[in-house]
Image: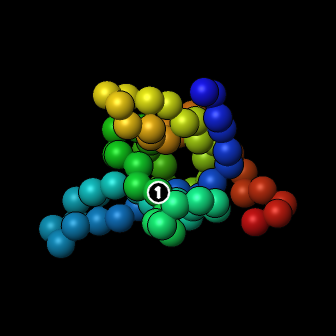
Amino acid sequence: MPDTRIAELTKVFGNEGQLLFYTTLRYAGGRARCDFIKVELVPAFEGEAAWFELERFKQTGWTMWRAIRQVDRPAWA
């Protein structure tokens, strides 16, 4: 099931300023307009948003995304 894509991740903060999770736009399928990614699945980066190569994987029956590496903004974005 290895599936990868390039996407921009955006930090989402709570009321106390703690980093809650990351979001990325969903380009196809499903009802949701974005995917949510756990903090522990993304390497730390500077700023509010950054581009990453993401990999889809299964964990405890759920399909999830994790960031493999940070990349430059693609020309198509």
Identify the image quadrant of the N terminus. top right
Identify the image quadrant of the C terminus. bottom right
Mark 1 residue element: strand
Structural crowding at the residue carrying mark 1, measured as other residues with C-alpha within 10 Å and reported as few (<14), some (14–19) or many (≥20): some
Mark 1, residue position: 35
- Say whether residue 70 is visible: no
Q: Residue 2 occupies which quadrant of the picture?
A: top right
Picture coordinates of residue 39, whole percent (x, y): 34, 45
Residue located 59% across and 41% down the image: 54
Q: Going by the picture, which residue comes out furthest to the left?
A: 16
Picture coordinates of residue 5, whole percent (x, y): 67, 45
Q: Going by the picture, which residue comes out furthest to the right?
A: 75
Residue located 44% across and 29% down the image: 58
- Which amino acid lies under the numbered mark 1 shown in the image of this protein? Asp
Residue located 35% across and 46% down the image: 38
Residue located 34% across and 55% down the image: 21
Q: Is residue 25 left or right of residue 72?
A: left
